[in-house]
Image (cartoon, grey):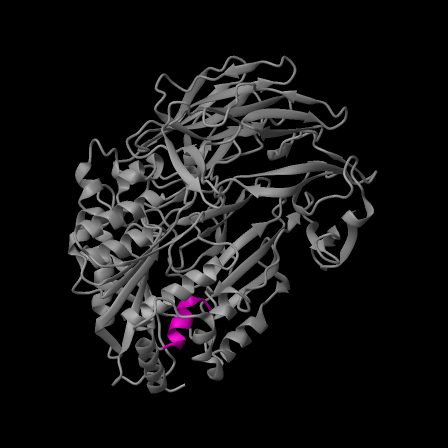
Amino acid sequence: MNSIIYITRLNILIGVLTFQFLLSSDELHSQHAETSTPSLEDIFKKNIFSSKSLSGIHWMRDGKYYTTLENLNGVDDQIIAKYDITTGKQTDVLLHTGKIRPSKTPKLPVIKSYTFSNDEKLILLATDVENIYRRSTKAYHYIYDISTQSILPLGHSQKQSYATFSPDGRQVAYVSENNLYIYNVYDQSTTLITKDGKFNEIINGSADWVYEEELYLTKAFEWSPDSKKIAFLRFDESHVKEYNMQIWGGLYPVDYRFKYPKAGEENAIVKVYIHDLESGNNLLCDTGENNDIYLPRIYWLPNARQLSVIRMNRLQNQLDLLHINTQNGEAEVVLSESAETYVNLTDNDDLRYLRDGKHFIMTSEKSGYKHIYLYSTDGRQIKQITQGNWEVDKLVGIDEKEKIIYYTSTEKTPLERHLYSIQWDTNQKKRLSNTDGVHIVDMSPDCKYYIDSHSSISRPQQQDLHKADGVFIRNLLNNKELKAKTQMYGMVDKEFFEVSAADGSILFGYLLKPAEINTEKKLPLLIHVYGGPGSSQLVMNKWAGCDWHQYLVSLGYAVACIDNRGTNGRGVSFGHATYGLMGKLELEDQLKGVEYLKTLPYVDPERIGIWGWSYGGYMSSLALFLAADTYKAAIAVAPVANWRFYDTIFTERYLGLPQDNAEGYDSYSPLSHTRKLQGKYLLVHGTGDDNVHFQNAIHLQDALIKHEKQFESFYYPNKNHSIQGGTTRFHLYTMMTAFILRSL
């Protein structure tokens, strides 16, 4: 479609919107229905541009088969089917819900997930799954015996969290109401191994809010390899201050109070215990005299006589690896790592103890880039396995027999992720992924096969089965029809660009613009930003499909994104550059990107806006307040107003304690600069946000009112940080579209 038509339609819409706050969905759709361009209903209600994916695949232990949970005639008729990995043919049905009836239950509830016992004779089924926070859930569980086709409930009246088979398959451990239990599969008895669990006071076997959110820890217990012991964390959060949210809906709102340690405040005291099933005793382990620490990971060594614990100090710039004697609880520090900024504990567990009992594999940034190291169990470094000015992304498999490690990395380019194998004794390395883009790999337990889920800016997700040496076996899914559909709707591909930061670092960005442009009619530009420290990159060679940005392009906008310093995948120098003063370098880098975009002949330098969510909302607010000569409008969704309001682990990792670094907390706080607002500002927040509290929006709004600044705000009742559910996302993006149309 000719760009003159885009601009004409845009001007008409802006005129109509002068007297409206929101544009209805029917009006938005009618403006472009005749042109086969996408509508907000298509994207957020009908989901017609969603990628298909093979989800819920469970590898069988021999690596020759996999299972999937499937619906036959709706969710009330489900099967767990077994498939041959090489042919894709179904070889067995291990469970059919239509043919079983649990005792004391009219019928089995809908299965949401499942796990096998190690011998794959029993299946643990999760039903009625209920979210607690971002990563935590609770559910009712059932144990199904494949051979007898019998099924029993786990044996607890309340919902359970993190139900896990013991290695011998004879017992299941789980958490309920802050206590840790063991259920015996064969005599159907239940043993309570902690008794002091209490909401907002003591948690046994699961993590508190801040560990879950920032250290990616939910299940806080581990079975020993011999099934004779369970190691678990105990959180004493009785002294931690509470945050109060009101839940709206009834005649009177309901208070929900939970423990949330804000920067500089007290954390929970965490201890490690080992429960001995034979004696029934809980042994307290020695993790040091200082209680103001973090214990984010526990692992068993193969010999079951030692427990491994990662310990970090409050500032997270010192990491110690402890080996604990499971007979007496005494600890030995076998490895320590420190940094001037922080030691990066990644969201995936990159510490792997080898079955030989003599070595472990671990990743570290101590060379300046995240790489893989081999250690002896006494903590002595044997060798650095990978090296170079690039980052290991994830460990996906370790073949101990062949001494091969499989991993994804940024070696080709930070914009992509590729799969590699390396033999740690010979250093022989091979790149296994050949197509451009981002590759996410799921490897079989025996490291014989892997499923490669990959995409690029021009290719939707494709899933392929390969042998471990990279040899292609067959395509599992390709989404070709989705590619054809996006072409039919006129979707455009991202164009990558590069600019230089003040320190000479290369900044990557992407740009979306209409396929046809009349340079005499310049385009308004919207910048999408996140940019937080340690965060995933937004600028990557992967499929985005038809999203809100594509919709704006269909209305005649250009959309761009720049990954500033602080984001991941680029090494310590780039990723840790913002330490101690968040906001300053990020904004400088964003402005460098805008400087370049202003030079493009079709970009209108007088109509540039910015939007972001969470850290991105913090950045968009800061940008509008501090760079009014550049940005005309901003949308901030769930923004942090001041880092003093945010949690201990994230904030102190990047800023230190507020008691020691007041300037770092306040000088680039949006609250410190509300008086400088000149452009159009839309502030959006969910009142039920347990992560970035609604408090942030209240303080921002209060400060803006104090300085007599006009702005727009919208709050979603009871919605959390993701602001979704029902028609919420459709409503949100309809509102944001209307704001952009009348503001840029």
* Identity of the residue furthest to the front in this view: 251
Residue 29, relative to residue 580: is it above or below?
A: below
Q: Is residue 686 among the parts visible in the rendering?
A: yes
In percent of width and height, residue 88 lies at: 71, 59
Magenta span: predominant SS is helix
Q: Residue at x 48, y 54 (%)?
A: 724
In percent of width and height, residue 35 lies at: 47, 83
In percent of width and height, residue 390 lies at: 36, 52
**Left-right relation of 112 to 436:** right
- Quadrant containing the N terminus is bottom left
Q: Is residue 576 among the parts visible in the rendering?
A: no
Residue 479, relative to residue 334: is it above or below?
A: below
In percent of width and height, residue 39 lies at: 47, 73
Which residue is nearer to you in this view: 401 or 233? 233
Which residue is nearer to you in this view: 247 or 104? 247
The magenta stretch spans residue 310: no
The residue range painted magenta reads 546-555
Q: Residue at x 44, y 62 (%)?
A: 731
Residue 12, relative to residue 354: is it above or below?
A: below
Quadrant of residue 264 in the image? top left
Quadrant of residue 508 in the image? bottom left
**Left-right relation of 251 to 119:** left
